[in-house]
Image (cartoon, grey):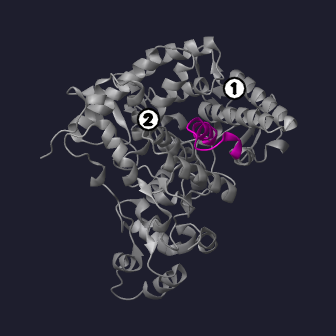
Amino acid sequence: MRLQDEMATADVLTPADRYQELFVAVQTTGVFDDSKTFVDCAPRGDPAQILAAYRAQRDDAGFDLADFVHRHFLPPEIHASHYVSVPGQSLKDHIDGLWDVLTRHPHQHPPNASLLPLPHPYVVPGGRFGELYYWDSWFSMLGLAESGRHDLLRAMAANFAFLIDHWGHVPNGNRTYYLSRSQPPVFALMVELFEQHGVAQALTFLPQLRREHAWWMDGADTLEPGHARRRCVRLADGSLLNRYWDDRDTPREESYVEDVTTAKQSTRPPCEVYRELRAGAESGWDFSSRWCDDGELSSIRTSAILPVDLNSLLYKLERQISLLSQASGEAEQAEAFRLRAEARQAAIDRMLWNGDAGAYLDYDWKRNAPRDALNAATVTPLYVGLASREQARQVSQALRLRLLRDGGIGTSEVASGEQWDQPNGWAPLQWLAIGGLRNYDDPLAREIARRWLHTVGSLYEREGKLVEKYTLVRKDGGAVGGGGGEYPLQDGFGWTNGVTRQLLHEDPAHPANRTRAAKRG
């Protein structure tokens, strides 16, 4: 089937919209252990007929919901053992071999399921995450480039351009239930990588860069000081900055039971809690004390916070549009986006730079106060080059004193039980810290890279796999996988593979290059 036909017949209703009370019944009665399983199921027949059959049969004596679901839906295949290396295989060879395992193809899109069709093959993170994810893909691409997989880089480039052309933005992932939000806007970084490796010219993607920017800035032009609309906030002094948001205020369908449970623990209206949880998911940091008032997830206030990383990435996007517009001869547009970027940089310096902490801190725009807690997003201004040398020096000092751990850069200083907090370390945050510090010739970059490679190599040597996140405090001489959050630790794993493959290439003398998977059994 041609892609145009697939898109025309695709069921863009989310599973909750499509299956209504059947969806609620399945999610609340525990038919599946994981809330994400049902929303990823493929219907074995016409969705409307399945819903009608449920309504006709649910009150029958002896009706078995689980049996009904398994007769009418095909659960997704969860690849688990495929991610474990053969004994004796090097870490680099293991990663190079994983790309095909993690690749999905357009012909694998089941009809009438929540999976949004894409025109070309794409790389998924692994485990329960069997679809393309926005910011995950950027870090996976680093490894694809070093593995020489320009075929997949080219395919991914076309897929991301397609998503923006078709939906106006890059969804969190290519699922219908992800359409109401995005993730950290890294398409501008992807475009640079495509050109660097000869996959495509950056100028080719100028229309998509402009359209993505327009999506993030929707409603900004008419905002009065002290007001917000969707992802835009106009501060009292007229500064314009952005926040994470989601266009829905219902429980996340892939985490339905978890969100309903969280909302019950709050005194706020449930819809407010659901919106904040969804906005936290758009951040990619789902979840973290970064978004909460206290140690409880029910206190989450994501939309009240102006994040350092989001605004830094939008600065990068505006700079990229300006430079590419200049190259294409669109001088007026180039100047307009140059001024936008400069205004954003000035606002970041005023609102997000904290001289007392010597670091960039998120800002609570509703309370007109910086957030006290330091987190690893403080490196993002260095990564996009908007920090001064003095600011970069102070950030480096804060990292060394407050976030540097045995195994790399810590996510935050708080042990909340959420996965984007202590004691976990994440590959994307290591890469942003390393790249940001390198931009300012800081030797801490090499130290973080060395520690992270030891972390990944240590677990690989013992267990023969890479995982989603790691505990950064060594136990019994080696690294262990991270914990916390809403689901078990996942193997695979796209962004860990990508960052690690890049760092192995850059430091061929590191012992991780000689690491071999141990014999099992």
Q: Is residue 192 magenta?
A: yes
Residue at the disc numbered 2: 499
Question: Outermost residue toward the right?
Answer: 332
Is 377 situated left or right of 448 in this image?
right
Q: Residue at x 43, y 60 (%)?
A: 36
Q: Is residue 218 magenta?
A: no
Q: Is residue 269 visible?
A: no
Question: In this figure, what is the number of numbered marks?
Answer: 2
Report the Cα–Cα distance between label 1 and label 2.
28 Å
- Residue 490 versus residue 151: which sits nearer the camera? 151
Q: What number is the disc on residue 348?
A: 1
Crowd band around label 2 with a 10 angstrom C-alpha radius: few (<14), some (14–19), many (20+): many
Which x, y percent locates residue 246? 63, 51
Q: Is residue 445 above or below residue 265?
A: above
Label 1 secondary element: helix
Which x, y percent locates residue 470? 35, 35
Q: CB atoms at circles 1 and 2 under 8 Å apart?
A: no
The quadrant of the image that shows the N terminus is bottom right
Residue type of the residue flagged with mark 2: Val
- What segment carries the magenta color? 186-204
Name the chief secondary structure element in magenta.
helix
- Residue 329 versus residue 376: which sits nearer the camera? 329
Lower sequence index among marks 1 and 2: 1
Q: Nearer the viewer, mark 1 or mark 2?
A: 2
Q: What number is the disc on residue 257?
A: none
Q: Residue at x 23, y 35 (%)?
A: 516
Residue type of the residue flagged with mark 1: Ile
